[in-house]
Image: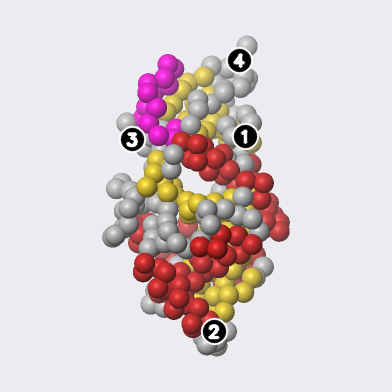
Amino acid sequence: MKADNIVEENANELLARKIVSAWQEEKFLSAERFANFPYRFVGTSPRLGVRWEIFGGRLGLETYTGHDEPVIMPADKPRIVFWRPVGTPQKIKGWWRLPLQSNPIYLTGFTQVDDPAQYFASWDRRVREYRNQFYKKQAAGDYRIVPVSAEVFAKDFPRKGKYRAFYDYSMNKIMRCSELFGPDSHYYEVLDKAGHVRAGLLATDSPQENYSRYMVGFRNNENVDQCIGVGIIDHWFREGISRGIRYFDFGVFWVPGNPPSWKGFSHFKAQFGVKYIRYGKTLIKFVRASP
């Protein structure tokens, strides 16, 4: 997503491999799925796959994401295997490229912090100004950011009628992150002077990878003060840096063909010194049952 006055920068392959491997941990993949969905993991990280069955267990489906061709393990059922490659690999024997993308994620982005004291140096000028505004209002007592429990965060998460599916998905993720990540899950809320909740952000960490991933966030008013969104992102960065985090993953960014509703938030995220990882069209392979 290219926002005004922002230079779009792609991550080099070594760095892209590190970020993709970080969120291919079992906990991150589990947080994206409903707990009662009958899936299991196959393979090993960073080429971990997810398998489930359809047609009464007669056919298996597997999905993988990564730079390298997945290692397909033997199984007693025929399978359709989907591989979402990073970049656009040359034609690989045995794989077919789907003409349409089966998964809407073409582009993800993250920010790398090289100098913790100047973590905001690569940010767009406008968000740096909003950051200063938030600090002034915070000092005046207009806003404060507090850590909350998963239960409180879920209660405060806005329920919008026409987005019921998104609400249910978000509720699942909010509670699953607490179960899966424990103290490495971080729930923050912005409160105004009257104690009303204005915004919230959930992020989860992989300390061994110095990595943190934005999972879900909200604003309780479409006309909310613009500096609040920047303030809570800044808080995520500052708190993460204090724990040794150096890579902050914003997740998915809008590209043409994605839902229009992604566009505004993608433009907002693009202002935080983001480097991008691009994904090719999904590849597919049919695998026979092993004897």
In the rendered image, the quadrant that contains the C terminus is top right
> Which of marks 1 and 2 precedes in the sequence?
1
**Residue 160 at x, y = what percent?**
45, 67
Within the magenta stretch, is there residue 276?
Answer: no
Q: CA distance from mark 3 to mark 2?
A: 51 Å
- Label 2 belongs to which residue? 139
Question: Disc 4 marks which amino acid?
Answer: Ser
Q: Are marks 2 and 4 in contact (CB under 8 Å)?
A: no
Q: Element type at marker 2?
A: helix
- Label 1 belongs to which residue? 45
Question: Disc 3 marks which amino acid?
Answer: Leu
Question: Disc 2 marks which amino acid?
Answer: Ala
Q: CA distance from mark 3 to mark 4?
A: 30 Å
Q: Of circles 3 and 2, which is in front?
A: 2
Residue at the spot 29% in from the left edge and 59% down from the top edge: 5
* 171, above or below 56, in the image: below
**Residue 4 at x, y = what percent?**
28, 60
Residue at the spot 53% in from the left edge and 81% down from the top edge: 138
**In the image shown, does 253 or 61 lie closer to the viewer?**
253
- Label 4 belongs to which residue? 290
Q: Element type at marker 3?
A: loop
Instruction: Name the chief secondary structure element in magenta.
Output: loop
Q: Element type at marker 4?
A: loop
